[in-house]
Image (tube, rainbow, N blue to C red):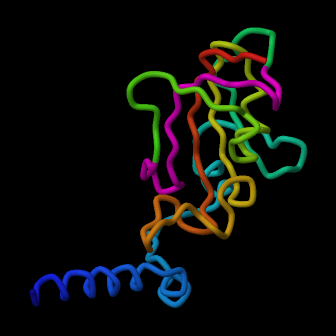
Amino acid sequence: MTLRLISPLLLVLLMAGCSKDQDATNPPVCEEGLISVEAYAAADTVTYTELDETGLLYRILEPGSAERPTLSSEVTVNYVGSVTNGRVFDQSRNGPVTFPLSNLIKGWQLGIPLVGRGGKIRLLIPSGLGYGSQGSCRFGQCSICPDSDLVFDIELVDFAG
């Protein structure tokens, strides 16, 4: 009988510990060694192009077909996403994945239409075109820390629309 009373109480305490207020008072611990996309590009041995003063830097590795996706397209891609210290936070693992381009971060919305079907591009995305001051955090753990600039290697396998 005592055990039955303790378990619900423990559950309530654990749930209270996951509140948004706790995240605000205990910000997530984020890694060191992150640099801006400008510093990343300057340290690289290749040249990047800025897209219309947006801050998005890119390098087309393979242009792909002449036809380009638009914001209303669904894109099928292989990709690897990392922060500027080289830590990979996401990637397509078991083959290409498909997303509505309009649902993706602004850096992808601007960068993916620069290549056609079969094209490959490296995007250096400043925080404001990525996850911004929110980062990508849950329960005090961040896969992408707030204000992190991002690096994506993307292959546009296909698109529709």
Quadrant for the N terminus in the image: bottom left
Q: Is residue 150 left or right of residue 101?
A: left
Where does the image place residue 109, in percent across and percent down from the top left?
76, 38
Find the residue positioned furthest to the right. 52
Query: From the viewer's perspective, is residue 57 above or below residue 100?
Result: below
Instruction: Using the image as rendered, state which of residue 71 and residue 39 is in the foreground.
Output: 71
Residue 32 drawn in magenta: no
Quadrant for the C terminus in the image: top right
Find the residue positioned furthest to the top. 65
- Give, as a single range, the part of the protein colored magenta: 69-89
Q: In this view, does 15 lie to the left or right of 148?
A: left
Find the residue positioned furthest to the front. 1
Q: Is residue 87 left or right of residue 76?
A: left
Rendered residue at 42%/52% (across/down): 87
Instruction: Using the image as rendered, state which of residue 31 and residue 138 is in the foreground.
Output: 138
Q: Is residue 21 left or right of residue 128?
A: left
Where does the image place residue 112, in percent across and percent down from the top left?
72, 30
Rendered residue at 69%/32% (across/down): 100
Rendered residue at 71%/41% (across/down): 103
Where does the image place residue 56, in percent across and percent down from the top left?
76, 47
